[in-house]
Every structure is written in structure tokens, then in C-alpha cells.
Amino acid sequence: MKTPAPACACGIVLALLSRLAVLQTARAQKNDIDIYSLTVDSKVSSRFAHTVITSRVVNRADAAKEVTFQMELPKKAFITNFSMIIDGVTYPGNIREKIAAQEQYSAAVARGESAGLVKATGRKVEQFQVSVNVAPAAKVTFELVYEELLKRHLGAYELLLKVRPQQLVKHLQMDIHIFEPQGISFLETESTFMTNELEKALTISQNETKAHIRFKPTLSQQQNSPELQDTVVDGNFIVRYDVNRTLSGGSIQIENGYFVHYFAPEGLSGIPKNVIFVIDKSGSMSGKKIQQTQEALIKILEDLSLKDQFNLISFSGEATQWKPSLVPASAENVKEAKSYAANIHAQGGTNINDAMLMAVQQLDKANREELLPSGSVSLLILLTDGDPTMGETNPTKIQKNVQDAINGKYSLFCLGFGFDVSYAFLEKLALDNGGLARRIYEDSDSSLQLQDFYQEVANPLLTAVTFEYPNNAVEEVTKDNFRLFFKGSEMVVAGKLRDQDSDVLSAKVSGQLPMQNITFQTESRVTEQEDKFRSPKYIFHGFMERLWAYLTIQQLLEKMVSASDADKKALKTQALGLSLNYSFVTPLTSMVVTKPEGQQQSQVAEKPVENGGCENGLLASVPRFRTHYDSTSVPGLMLKLAAPVLAHASSSPDEALDDMDLRIKETSPTALLPAPIQAPFVILPLPGQSVEKLCVDINRSQGPMSLLSDPDQGLEVTGQYDMEKAQFLWIEVTFKKPQLQVHVSPEHVVVTRDRRSSAYKWKETLFSVMPNLKMTMDKAGLLLLSSPDKVTIGLLSWDGPGQGLRLLLQDTDRFSSHVGGILGQFYQDVVWGPTAAADDSKRTLRVQGHDHPATRELKLDYQEGTPGTEISCWSVEL
């Protein structure tokens, strides 16, 4: 029976025309708003970053357009200023106490105005956006300023900038100036949008104490393709660096009557730890959550030191301990614990109280019986995804029970899985007991988030750290005593100098090692330090006073979480005063954005918090809603459009065309096709030859195998092949300098750098420049690891015939004579036998005394991605 083709074709044509019309309309309207300049200027002075984002826009339409300036900024940052300049008139943002801003907001709502809140929060960033009507041919300048103290995390500071112009911008420029008097020990950049063409627009200059990173792409460099006027610039730009350190009392820096003291001594040995993992296995953890928790726990257990002790407690309605007491982290115990973790099943309620008290009692018992090593540190790590539902369910009583039981002896760290968990409850539970809380976001990399957090606390170096300064020299000092100092972190103390005759500020830092007390002495000359911070190019003046205020506010807000009602009020008053005095948008203040006469008058910028609902348990937040637009986003802006609604609203016009193309193909008759040409698992350029390639397939299953090893290059490649699945389960590339590990599976790419792990999806743009190594991944999914003097390693998740992980090599002449492994052997002494008389497509390849039959075959070269190109190569099975 014939398909009624004419009717079907007609429907397809109509659908196609309607989608093209929408697409063209959207593009035409988007171009009415032209962002002709977008600049980001970030000055980092001694870890304190001051960032200014300026966007200049013109309305080229014949009618007024509503435009929304939209920018994402780091969660730890405080907005300090926002202004709009329209036709030469400046409309500033005014920072007020939250209650006053809420009253103005409520009044606007009562008048029927759509006073949308300018706020949203994400995993690492929060969003600032404000709308304004722009008259025909009118220009508007938006300027947003925010500040943040860069926190040292696993040995590095990270400056994150979001760059999302979403259209071509004539003048697009980022400038990042870094000034670190201690000296910059390393600096690297990473981007989720950089291409080889855009790399030409990136310049990095650096000397001992200063660095300047500039990104200034031309219009052609920004362009995604000649046919489309879309930009490729869309994503994260990250700068990571660290400073020089010694085994000393740290660095004291002084500017304009204020000082900041950074303390992170190198060369200390780790302290033995006793750690109990308290794992929620209630019914709500079933599925992906418990699976990711198990993956993380197994990896964490592998990382325990032989001098550590540990135990596992899992809980639902009841708590169950793996062992009756803590056990040493021996290979045998770790293996048994990993097996236990792999068999945890999620079901039942949530009895947090009993599980936590069981963990504390176990540490107390070991302490009484003198089973905890002298000078060791005891840690409790709680992971849960929900509120208590069994046993004691009152959060306040649980907090008191746990605090009374711990009594200052141990540190508690709480990890809240997802957004259903009561984060405020966990935060207070942790802060009451010398730890901290962290939200684990439900995503494909949740396991990595758990591992990453553990790495932060895995290596305690000092306990009971106290900073002391002469009483006649300083005042208004921030927090100056800390329970624990961990490897890769940093302690920061700031304060105000008193008027004194001496030009020297001295400090004493004391702490405890496992078997002894230790004291560090350091001093700094006031005049000498003041001179260092007078360069107008690399710093913004008065930054140290603002850093002191920033740090003081952060610590006051933290204290409020666990303070009594009486103390909370005093802390709030102090934090609010500083927030208003230094114009910081904090959880206690809001910024009211003024607008021209006749427009919405009261959009309010707030500081989002993790708790949701209440700001640090003090003040109910202003009602939250965001304006919804049928819209097209443009560089840092959103343009309100009146576009037709597509039948499939969730799809873009381009996606709709793709879907329709798929439907057309499905109605076509399918012809019998020959067996597809396969892509080999590895393509090896043969040594000493420029044309010939060796195509290698694996034909055996075994545990992790060494594919390549070259100690002279500091390079190792391992992998695990599964015969049943006929593919690699994973491949791992390890470099010694810089220390880097890239672990790929068919699902994702995991990059570990100095214990910091990040996960990326295949075909996600990645461009990272480190000392002596460049890592790139393009939209075809080809991940390349290259260096001027190293072999280039290529990795790919191939989705063509015989899908799976693929490995390729370039610049193989750089292998040393010590290269080994089942692939590395082909770069040693290789002898080709003659071709067979009857068949010149067969030869024998002798490698290190072993003969390998090689056959000339057609294979798919996957190096440029799907669909691949046919090549003729010598095929070998191993």
C-alpha cells in the first residue's frame, strides 16, 4: 500500500516554511539591538578581585525596545555598584537595608508594576539582570562592579569570568591584571569556548609578581561560521594561579592603614586522622544518588593514608556500623570497606540523630581506650539528602544533641545532596562543631563533587592555629584562631593598624603538630609595604580596607548561623553597618535600581543564599519571581520579542529542522548496505615513516593494562578493555610535569590537577593552557593533550561504526628510547618481514622478538571525528 506522499510532503513544507520564518524573524529582531562594546576589567590585588563589566548598546529599531542586561558572577562575590547611562543621564543603583528595599518593592507591586527581582542562583554563579526600555536610536551603557576574595582551593586561586555575548560584538575585550607581592608560582587559563582561532586573540604576559591576560577577538574570530552571524564566545573563562611560599609565618601586606596576613606554610607533614563516614541510605537516596555516593566512597577509601583510621556508618530508620570500632586503613581493611560500600542499598526513613550519636560514641570509646594516635585529628563526615523523618525529628534538638556529644573534641562536615535537603539545618550542625557544610549538586559529576570535598579535608597539617599581634599595633582584627589548617588551603587575617611610632608590624602564628607545638614568627615593614601598592595600573586603591570589610562581613554572617538570639542581633547590626558603609550587596542589603520616569521603578538586586526561603535564618526573603519573555538573548542582554510560539516550545528553530529532517528519513525505504568499514582502536604513525600508519585492535580482556609508558617524557597511558562489550571501559593519561591526570570513559572526561577534579562532557569545548601543556577538546569531541616537546595524545569517544573510546598519537618522533607498553613497543626496534609472494597485503611485523601478522586493510580514520575518512593501513591485532 502506497504512503499518501503528497499530503505528507505538504505538511513538511508548511512546517519547514513556518520554522524558517520564525528563525529569520528572530535573527532580524535580535540585530535591532546592537551591543557594540562589551568589556570586562578585573584587577586582582593580593587575592582580592575587583571586576567591572561594561556593556554599551544602541537600539537600531524604529520603535522602543525593552532590553535586559544580564550577567553571571561568582557566588562568593558581593555586588558593589551598578549604573545605567541613558542619553547622558546616569541612573545609579542604591544599596539599602533589605527591609527598606522590600517596602519599596511591595509598594511597586501594589501599584501593579512588574518589579521583577534581579536575582537567580546557580552552582558556581548567580545571575544579575535588569530591564530598561531603550528608545529608537538611543544608546545605553550598563556598568556592573563586584568584588570577591579568591579562596585558595587545593593549592590554587581561581578567578571565574562568564562571557556570554550571544552575538558578535565590535569591541569585545577582557583584561585581567594580577599583582601578588609574594610572587606568582604558576598561572594557567581554561576556557569552555576557546578555539585555535580565538587563541590568537589571547595574550598572556607575566613576570615575577605581575600578570596581564588580555582577550580581544576580532569580529571574524568571534564568528561561528561565515554563513551564520552567531558568536562562538559563550561560556567560562577561568584563571588559576598560586603564589610562592616557604615554611614561614606567611606574608603580611599593608596598604593605607590596613593589613592582611596570608598564612599557608609549605613543607609540613600530614597529621594522622580518624574519620567516620556517616552515609544516608534512606529511600530518597535510591537510584543515581546512592550509586554516585558508592563511587565516591570507593575512591575516597582508596585515598586513605596507611596512618589513618576509619569506619563507616550507614543509616536509614536505624544506624548500622560497618565495624564495631575504627580500624587502620590497611590494604585489607580498605578492600573490605569498598566491598561493603558497593553493597549499600537505599530504603527506609532518615534517622540522622541516632547515626550521628553512634559515630560520636565510637570516637569517644576509642579515645577513652587510648586507641586514637597521639596528636591525630578526628573528623566526622555526614552525607544526607533529606530532613530527619525517624527517631528524633526536631532539627533544633538534633543540633543540640550532636553539639553536646561532640563538645568541641571533633570536627563535623556536612554534605547536603540536592535541593530537597534542609541546608540551613546542616550548615548550623557543621558550624556548631568546627566544620563546614557543602551542597552536592545532583548532576553527572556528583561523585566527583564528593571526592573533591574530601580532598579539601583529607590532609590536615596543623591544629589549634592562633594569630597574635602586638596590642598597641592593630585593632579590629578578623577571626584570628582556627581549629584546623588543611593542605592546599590558606588562612587569612585582616585588620586595621593603630597609629604607632614603629615602622614594623610583627606577628606570631602558633599551632600544634602531632607530637609538638610549633610557632612561626614574621614581620613586615609598613613603609616598604605601602610603596608596593602604589602602582595605579595593577591595583585599585584602598583595596585592603575593602578586603578587611568583605572578610569581616563574611565571618559575621557565618557567626549568625549558630549564635544565640541576643548575639545574633548584635552581629546583624555590625554586618549591616559594614555592608551599607562599603556598599556591598549582602544577604542583609538590597540594591534598588532606579530607572527613567515612566518605567518600572523598583527592580531589586539581592544576594542569594544557599538556604532558600530565609536569609541565614533571620529574615524572610523578598518574594521571588522572574519575568518570562518570548525572547532572544544578545550579548549580556535579553531582548523582549513578540515571536510566534512553536509547536514544540522546548526546541529551537534549528532543533526543529533537525527533528523534521529525521522524520523525512524515517519515511524513506531502507536499502541493504554493505558492512561498514570499522575504525581501529588505535592509529599509530609508524616510526621513521611519514605516510604509513599502523591500525591496532585489542583482542583480549584483562585488568588495567599499560598502553604507553615513557619515563623520560613523564608520560603514562593505561586502559581497560572489555571483550564482551568490544570496547575500552576507560583510558587514563598521566603526566608528571605538570601533574595532571585525564581519565576518559564513554560517558565523560575527568581531569585531575593537583587533587582538583573537573568533569566534562564529550564534545564540550575545552581549552586549557598550563605550564608546558595544552589541553583542548572541540565540538567533534577530539581531546588533544600537547606540548612543544612531548608526544601529542589524542582521545575520542567515537560514535561511528564500532563505537567506543579511541586513542591516537601525533609527534611520535618525540618518544624516548625508553618508551614501553603494548603500544609503546612499536616505537622500539621494529623489523618488517617481506610481503607474501601470493598476497602483498600481508606482512609480518617483528617487535621485541615477537611476530605480529599485519594485513593491509581499509579502515576509518576517526581523527577528524564522525563520519571519518577511509584510509589504507597495516592492521594488527594484539
Image (cartoon, rainbow, N blue to C red):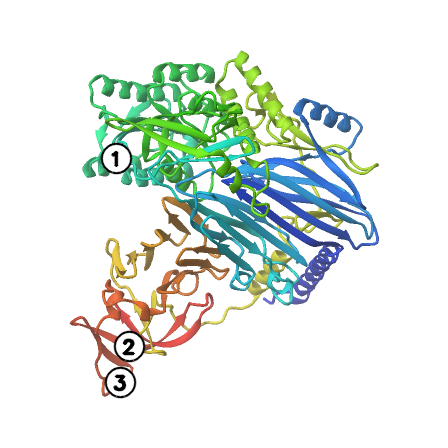
Q: Is residue 732 left or right of residue 99?
A: left
Rendering coords of residue 122 (x, y %): 55, 39
> So how many labels did they put on this image?
3
Label disc, if present, on residue 337 of the rendered structure: 1
Q: Which residue is mark 2?
A: 855
Which element type, helix, strand or loop, lies under badge 2?
A: strand
Label disc, if present, on residue 794 of the rendered structure: none
Question: How would you rate the neighbour count of disc 3 (Cα within 10 Å): few for under 14, some for 14-19, many for 20 or more?
Answer: few
Q: Which residue is mark 3?
A: 839
Q: Quadrant of the N terminus?
A: bottom right
Q: Quadrant of residue 156?
A: top left
Query: Could you tell which of marks 3 and 1 lies nearer the N-terminus?
Result: 1
Which element type, helix, strand or loop, lies under badge 1?
A: helix
Marks 2/1 in contact by CB < 8 Å: the verdict is no
Residue 300 visible from this viewpoint: yes
Q: Which residue extends farthest left?
A: 849
Question: How would you rate the neighbour count of disc 1 (Cα within 10 Å): few for under 14, some for 14-19, many for 20 or more?
Answer: many
Q: CA distance from mark 2 to mark 1?
A: 48 Å
Rendering coords of residue 770 (x, y %): 42, 54
Q: Is residue 674 above or below residue 566?
A: below
Q: Which residue extends farthest front?
A: 501
Which element type, helix, strand or loop, lies under badge 3?
A: loop
Q: Is residue 454 left or right of residue 218?
A: left
Q: Quadrant of residue 232?
A: bottom right
Q: CA distance from mark 2 to mark 3?
A: 10 Å
Q: Nearer the viewer, mark 2 or mark 1?
A: 1
Circle 1: residue type: Ala
Circle 2: residue type: Thr
Q: Which of the pair 539/672 is nearer the observer?
A: 539
Q: Which of the pair 13/682 is nearer the observer?
A: 682
